Amino acid sequence: MSRRTIIAGNWKMNTRAADGASLAQGIADAVGENPTVEVVVCPPSVYLSRVADVLAGSAVGLGAQNLYPADDGAYTGEVNAAMLCDSGCRYVILGHSERRAILGETDAQISEKLAAALAGNLVPIVCVGETLDDREGGKTEAVVEEQLRGSLDGLDEARASGVVIAYEPVWAIGTGKTASPEQAEEVHAFIRKLLGELFTDEVAQQMRIQYGGSVKPGNAKELLGQPNIDGALVGGASLKVDDFVAIINAG
Ligand code: 13P
């Protein structure tokens, strides 16, 4: 089973219009027309249309960092899947640990967002991952399992293969501490086994699982070389053209 590697840049609440546009342009130029890996950038939502214009005709896909799971209506401050599509998005990150921790997002909310993303024809990237306390308390698998079962609740087996999972250990995000390739592979293999139980082994083999947490040019190749690591969700290093392109080239 060959799964196409997917490298996504999560720009978080960084970049302004001008530097985001030049970052996107630099990545599109470097990636060319036929990259062997799938490449995605996820700018802040206010800049999606602008980055979409820069990426038009390029091989780089556009993603959002969140959505609100409702049709148009009275939801002040929110943006739904149809609006993201209209702005040129094909992907959406859901349940990032920063949203879980800072905004109190729950697995139940993430599962609603997942359903809305799929109904809106967006490729969801569903994030899970344990904190340092969880890991040190031997609870990594239990926490990841609970997050996955909750976030994927109600997901139809027929749609599951189109969902991307991102394993992002919270202790490795923005800290410079990367999970070792062995640590990451161990959890990725666990996630794939669980996906086999939730759906079928065949579906689990098709689903892509990204690693995220201090991915850099210097560690990308070893991480991406693990059998169950099918891509990377990159924060800090996705804000520099050279670093992000080096990670893409490691894929
Ligand atoms: P860093 O690559 O900056 O650690 O961030 C990872 C992340 O949270 C991507 O979603």
Image (cartoon, rainbow, N blue to C red):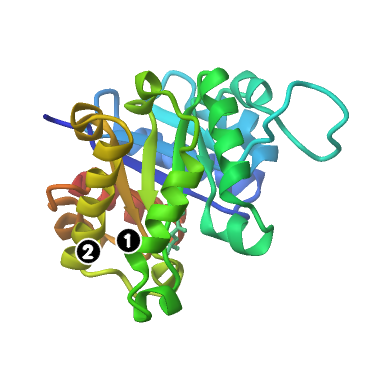
Name the mark on residue 215. Answer: 1
Image spot of residue 58 (x, y percent) = 40, 24
Ligand 1 closer than 8 Å to label 1 CB = yes
Q: Look at 45% across and 43% down and name the residue there.
A: 126
Say what secondary structure mark 2 lies in. Answer: helix
Do the numbered discs 1 and 2 sit on residues whose CB atoms are within 8 Å?
A: yes
Q: Look at 44% across and 54% down and name the residue there.
A: 146
Q: 246 above or below 79?
A: below
- In the picture provided, is 18 more to the left or to the right than 200? right
In the image shown, does 187 or 56 lie closer to the viewer?
187
Kindly tell me whether residue 165 is visible in this rendering: yes
- Splitting the image into 4 quarters, where does residue 149 fall? top left
Q: Which residue is mark 2?
A: 219
Image spot of residue 66 (x, y percent) = 61, 41
Type of residue at label 1? Val
- In the picture provided, is 163 more to the left or to the right than 183? right
Type of residue at label 2? Asn
Q: Look at 37% across and 62% down and name the residue there.
A: 142
Say what secondary structure mark 1 lies in. Answer: loop
Tell me the quarter of the image containing the C terminus. Answer: top left
In the image shown, does 95 or 17 lie closer to the viewer?
95
In the image shown, does 234 or 99 lie closer to the viewer?
99
Q: 105 above or below 156?
A: below
Image spot of residue 104 (x, y percent) = 67, 58
Q: CA distance from mark 1 to mark 2?
A: 6 Å
Tell me the quarter of the image containing the N terminus. Answer: top left
Q: Look at 38% across and 80% down and name the residue there.
A: 137
Badge 1 local density, few (<14 within 10 Å), some, or many (20+)? many
